[in-house]
Amino acid sequence: MRKFLVVALVLGIASAANAVVIYVDGSDPGESIEIGEGLTPVISVVGEDASSWLGYIIIEEGGTGALSNALNLDAAGDMGAVSPYAEAGWGSGYELTIAMSPGGTPAVAVGPQFTLDYVGGVLGETARILLFADPEYGIPADSVAITVVPEPMTVILLGLGGLLLRRRK
């Protein structure tokens, strides 16, 4: 019986730590994604269950770009806060809070709860975006690395220029 309770506790903590995930432009990108130079992808924080939580979404210190235009969505319930956050040695971004009122109205809805824009990435560099959710701030609930690459038209023009140079020889 004691072992069963320990396993249930561990699984409960693990599920709480993974109750929120990062989406980029509406889809789950996995561990990394490439975006075209000059584009501004929308980062969504999506709740996978209907529970209250507190967390942080940050760009790890040393990463390029910034998170901006933080919006909380109506489906998330009683929004406690979305406020700018920065700490040396950790990174900068936002503190996010979602809470259900004591009576349960409004309820916390499953689905997108916050959106933010990722802006200002430097060509060829990577920003690691981390999402920490209570109670385990030592381990990210989710993360994504965004690498800025040349926009497709730039790559096409460089390729055509290379072909023309080769043809002249």
Image: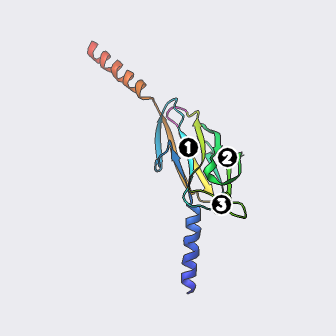
Q: Secondary structure at mark 1?
A: strand
Which residue is label 2 attached to? 94
Task: Give whichever of 36, 169 is nearer the camera.
Answer: 36
Mark toward the start of the polypeptide (2 vs 1) = 1
Rendered position, 36 above or below 99 = above
Q: Which residues are magenta?
A: 122-126
- Crowd rating for badge 1 (residues with CA inside 10 Å; few <14, some 14–19, many 20+): many
Residue most toward the top?
A: 168
Which residue occupies 56% across, 66% down?
Answer: 14
Q: Quadrant of residue 160?
A: top left
Q: Position of residue 27 (x, y in %)?
A: 47, 46
Task: Give whichever of 139, 29 is nearer the camera.
Answer: 29
Which residue occupies 59% across, 75% down?
Answer: 9
Q: Can see residue 169? A: no
Rendered position, 70 above or below 17 = above
Rendered position, 141 above or below 84 = below
Q: Position of residue 83 (x, y in %)?
A: 71, 46
